């Protein structure tokens, strides 16, 4: 069995908002193995972004423990690539300089990483846009640039919060395939792959990409299902039309909407 890279033990999160406490997450226990691709799906406001921030150590949980790579998380962790729900690009820096930012923050030689940054931009369909400012790009292009930034230092752990949310359907499918390629679906063994925790609102995207899909309840977010996606790899576009793909998607849809009683949410 693969070793656990992320281990969440009864994690809870209650925000202290001006209007009173907001319980965002409750009793989240989840293990993600090294090299595993796990998607989180759940209704808007159920705490998915909160969970990613907690795993990244950007925000402390109010309950439970979080362990990443064997270390308890109590501060922002290094060696991760994070794609936030909003692109969050520095508006005064060119796209290339935004993509190179993690190198500067890590005290690395940014100039030496320029060829890699340009290669990533090319891969994301942004070749020739490196010199532009973020405001000169569409929302989807900015989102792709933020994906390049997350990949720059080749981190072993990727936390991705609806990274393809602002893309048109065709670009979205292309980026999903590209992500699987970068992840090493074809040429790397499980332990050599990146570990990915991926938030999406698209059930089809979650099934297509993942080894497991974790379904969350409405706020406070709890885990109501954890489904193994036993489709063969490498995944192909044709698989989307398969019976197995449809059955898995329907299972997730039913769990999400409660149309057939999940029986596990309390
Ligand atoms: N900084 C904050 N202060 C107070 N409440 C917050 C804060 N951030 C999030 N919340 C609340 O916590 C809950 C979970 O928010 P979160 O952004 O994690 O949800 P989400 O699942 O990512 O939603 P979406 O799918 O819409 O992105 C929401 O009710 C939200 O209002
Ligand atoms: Mg969110």
Image (cartoon, rainbow, N blue to C red):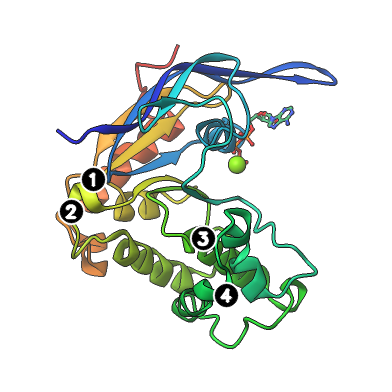
Q: Nearer the viewer, residue 40 or 145?
A: 145
Q: Name the secondary structure under disc 1.
A: helix
What whole-number distance in Å separates the C-alpha atoms at marks 1 and 3?
24 Å
What whole-number distance in Å separates the C-alpha atoms at marks 3 and 4?
28 Å
Bin the neighbour count of mark 4 within 10 Å (Cα to Cα): few under 14, some 14-19, many 20 and up: few
Return the disc, 2 or 3, that comes first in the chain's sequence: 3
Q: Which residue is mark 2?
A: 243
Return the disc, 2 or 4, that comes first in the chain's sequence: 4
Q: Which mark is residue 164?
A: 3
What whole-number distance in Å separates the C-alpha atoms at marks 4 and 1?
49 Å
Q: Which residue is mark 1?
A: 247
Q: Nearer the viewer, residue 69 or 245?
A: 69
- Residue 5 appears at what percent x and percent y? 33, 34
What whole-number distance in Å separates the C-alpha atoms at marks 2 and 3?
25 Å
The answer to which quarter of the image holds residue 257 is top left
Quadrant location of the C terminus?
A: top left
Quadrant location of the N terminus?
A: top left
Residue depicted at x 33% and y 51% = 194
Residue depicted at x 57% and y 31% = 47
Return the disc, 4 or 1, that comes first in the chain's sequence: 4
The image quadrant in which ligand 1 is located: top right
Q: Name the secondary structure under disc 2.
A: helix
User: CB at mark 3 closer than 8 A to ligand 2?
Assistant: no
The answer to which quarter of the image holds residue 45 is top right
Q: Nearer the viewer, mark 3 or mark 4?
A: 4
Q: Taking 53 as reference, is 182 left or right? A: left
What whole-number distance in Å separates the C-alpha atoms at marks 1 and 2?
6 Å
- Residue 24 appears at what percent x and percent y? 61, 23
């Amino acid at each position: 069995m693969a070793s656990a890279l992320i281990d969440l033990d009864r994690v809870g999160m209650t925000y202290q908002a001006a209007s009173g406490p907001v319980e965002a997450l409750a009793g989240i226990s989840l293990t993600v193995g090294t090299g595993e691709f796990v998607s989180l799906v759940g209704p808007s406001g159920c705490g998915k972004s909160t969970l990613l921030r907690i795993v990244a150590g950007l925000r402390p949980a109010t309950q439970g423990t979080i362990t990443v790579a064997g270390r308890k998380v109590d501060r922002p962790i290094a060696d991760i690539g994070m794609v936030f729900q909003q692109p969050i690009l520095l508006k005064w820096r060119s796209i290339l300089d935004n993509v190179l930012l993690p190198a500067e923050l890590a005290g690395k030689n940014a100039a030496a990483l320029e060829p890699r940054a340009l290669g990533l931009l090319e891969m994301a369909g942004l070749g020739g846009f490196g010199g532009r400012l973020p405001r000169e790009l569409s929302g989807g292009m900015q989102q792709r640039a933020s994906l390049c930034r997350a990949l720059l230092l080749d981190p072993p752990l990727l936390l991705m919060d609806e990274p393809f949310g602002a893309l048109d359907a065709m670009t979205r499918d292309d980026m999903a395939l590209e992500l699987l390629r970068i992840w090493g679906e074809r040429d790397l063994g499980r332990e050599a792959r990146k570990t990915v925790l991926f938030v999406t609102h698209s059930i089809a995207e979650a099934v297509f990409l993942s080894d497991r899909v974790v379904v969350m309840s409405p706020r406070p977010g709890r885990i109501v299902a954890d489904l193994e996606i036993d489709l063969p790899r490498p995944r192909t576009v044709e698989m989307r039309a398969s019976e197995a793909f449809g059955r898995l998607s329907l299972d997730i849809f039913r769990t999400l909407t409660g149309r057939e009683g999940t029986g596990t949410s309390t």
